[in-house]
Amino acid sequence: MRSGWFVLCCTALCLLTLNAQQRRASPAGEVRVAVVDLETLVRQLPEAAQIDRQLNETAQRFRDTLTQLRSELERRLDEYRKREGILTPDAKAKEEEALRQLQERYLQYQEDKFGVTGELAQLREQLLQPLRTRVQEAIRTVAREENFHVVLDRSSPAVLFAEDRFDLTYRVLDRLKRGQP
């Protein structure tokens, strides 16, 4: 909740600063603000659905491999527990070390694929960056055509209210679907 208030305060401060700068620059002193619902834009674009499919397929492949690694670890652990009583101390230590390494391999694979900087996060960023760039350019173009100075994301907690007449979402979507920036 506190972060939402922080975002709201920062947004208000930015708008006040822009308004003060605009007053110095123009006699009317008016700053025109519009909103765009980025979630709606992304849901409506076919490229986003294709990217989502590709990410889900990749994630499923990674999960399948993780499942295989976990199954192997569980199988080996089960075998070890069954034979533990008859193993020599050296054999026990050797098997425990092999199990520890297998567990580390499982955890490392999980981090490498699903971690914050893992393969899936990198792939998501790589696939989404061109789409983000297109969306931002379309927003910028529509905002300039409609003479808006600031465009906020309607789905952000910082936007508490916006009249529909200031919502550029479907104008931006139309531009994107027609293949225009």
Image (tube, helix red, strand yellow):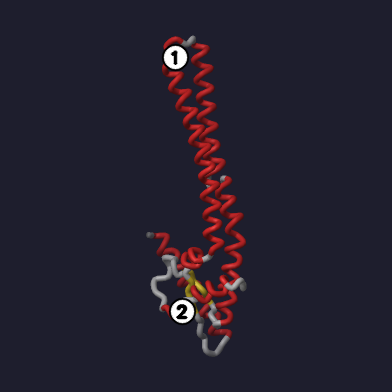
Instruction: Tell me the quadrant of the picture where the C terminus can be found.
Output: bottom right
The foreground one among 180 and 39 is 180
Residue 35 place in picture, x, y as percent? 47, 74
Asked if labels 2 and 1 touch by Cβ distance under 8 angstroms, the answer is: no
Q: At 51% across and 44% down in the image, what residue appears?
A: 60
Q: Residues within 10 Å of mark 1 (few under 14, many from 20)?
A: few
Query: Nearest the camera: 3 or 181?
Result: 181
Farthest-out residue, bottom: 27
Could you tell me if residue 97 is visible in this image?
yes
Answer left or right for 9 relative to 24: left
* Quarter of the image with the N terminus in it: bottom left
- Per the image, the residue denoted by label 1 is 83
Say which residue appears at 56% left-offset and 41% top-offset. 112
Q: Is residue 161 left or right of residue 178?
A: left
For discs 1 and 2, the disc positioned in front in the rendered view: 1
Q: Nearer the viewer, residue 54 or 112?
A: 54
**Image position, residue 159 (x, y; %):** 42, 70
- Name the amino acid, label 2: Phe
Q: Which mark is residue 166?
A: 2
Residue 74, picture quadrant: top left
**How far across and down, in percent of the image, does residue 172 sit?**
54, 74
Examine the rendering and report whether any part of residue 8 can be seen.
no
Look at the numbered disc 1 and give the secondary structure of its residue. helix
Which type of secondary structure does the marked residue at label 2 adopt? helix
Image point 53% across, 37% down: which residue?
65
Earlier along the polypeptide chain: callout 1 or callout 2? 1
Relative to residue 82, is residue 12 depicted above or below?
A: below
The quadrant in which residue 109 appears is: top right
User: Which of the labelled discs sits on residue 176, or is there none?
Assistant: none
